[in-house]
Image (cartoon, grey):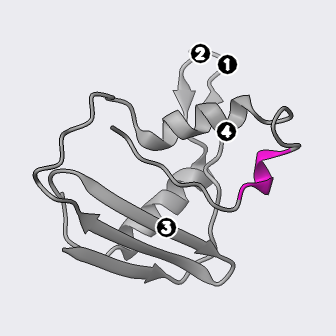
Amino acid sequence: MTWEQTFNTRPYAKGRPRFNRKTGSAYTPKNTREYEKLIASMYEGPLHAKGNLSVKIVFAIEGISIAITQLDSNREESKLTGDIDNYAKAIVDALNGVAYSDDKQIVWLELEKR
């Protein structure tokens, strides 16, 4: 099963966590929270999919398209427990200024977790 949807809103990059000076606790910036709420409210697909998923997201000025596909149930679960985007961000950020001048240059990133 594959679900596809287009979000007619300009893409927005998630803001870095902010820290409360008094408590030292981290929080997500307000504009990021509002954007995430907007995307969640616009989503019209199935809720709480189970099992392994493939997610393809295409970002463009005019909007965002997403395709979520339920993968074969025979596929082995990953031994890695972290979020795939966080694994990628660690590598992409580490190579910033080393393998490339700025990670903004990356226009295609293919990820898989095994």
* Mark 1: amino acid: Arg
Residue ID at (34%, 73%): 43
- Label 3: which secondary element: strand
Return the x and y of residue 31 as percentages of the image width and height: 61, 55
Q: Quadrant of residue 20?
A: top right
Magenta segment: does it hold 105?
yes
- Label 2: which secondary element: loop
Q: Quadrant of residue 70?
A: bottom left
Above or below: residue 114 compared with residue 53: above
Q: Which residue is mark 1?
A: 21
Return the x and y of residue 3 as percentages of the image width and height: 28, 76
Point out which mark residue 57 bears.
3
Question: Marks 3 and 1, how far apart in space?
Answer: 36 Å
Q: Earlier in the sequence, mark 3 or mark 4?
A: 3
Q: How busy is the neighbourhood of tag 3: few (under 14 within 10 Å), some, or many (20 plus)?
A: few
Residue ID at (54%, 61%): 35
- Label 4: which secondary element: helix
Point out which mark residue 24 bears.
2
Question: Marks 4 and 2, how far apart in space?
Answer: 27 Å
Residue ID at (27%, 56%): 53
* Mark 4: amino acid: Val
* Mark 3: amino acid: Ile
